[in-house]
């Protein structure tokens, strides 16, 4: 399963109380986590 696939699935469970700033932070964290997991799998 690709990180991209996970990101597409997220809106289904997205809390409605999040505002734009929270969403932006969350997306940045997701991107950072995806890059980190890619780097870790690449090292093997």
Image: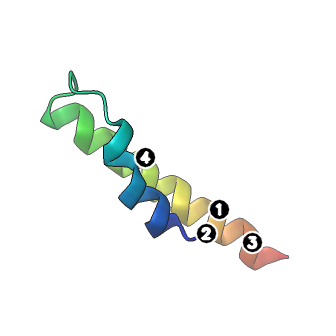
Q: Is residue 32 above or below residue 1?
A: above
From the image, tell me which residue sits under label 2.
1
Q: Is 27 left, or right, of 43 in this rendering?
A: left
Give the crowd class for mark 1: few <14, some 14-19, many >=20 residues within 10 Å: few
Q: Is 44 left, or right, of 26 in this rendering?
A: right
Q: Earlier in the sequence, mark 2 or mark 1?
A: 2
**In the rendered image, which quarter is residue 21 located in?**
top left
| Element assignment for label 1 | helix
Say if mark 3 contacts mark 1, CB within 8 Å: yes
From the image, tell me which residue sits under label 3.
41
Residue 38 place in picture, x, y as percent: 63, 70
| Element assignment for label 3 | helix
- Quarter of the figure that contains the C terminus: bottom right
Single out the mark in the foreground, 3 or 2. 2
Q: Residue at x 44, y 51 (%)?
A: 30
The CA span between labels 4 and 3 is 18 Å
Q: Is residue 32 above or below residue 29?
A: below
From the image, tell me which residue sits under label 4.
29
From the image, tell me which residue sits under label 1.
37
Residue 41 place in picture, x, y as percent: 74, 71
Q: Is residue 2 above or below residue 13?
A: below
The CA span between labels 2 and 1 is 12 Å
- Judging depth in this view, the residue of 16 and 22 nearest the camera is 16
The CA span between labels 2 and 4 is 18 Å
The CA span between labels 1 and 4 is 12 Å
Q: Earlier in the sequence, mark 1 or mark 4?
A: 4
């Amino acid at each position: 399963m690709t990180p991209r696939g996970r990101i597409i699935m997220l809106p289904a469970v997205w809390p409605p109380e999040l505002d734009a700033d929270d969403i932006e932070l969350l997306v940045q964290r997701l991107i950072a986590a995806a890059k980190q997991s890619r780097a870790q799998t690449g090292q093997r």
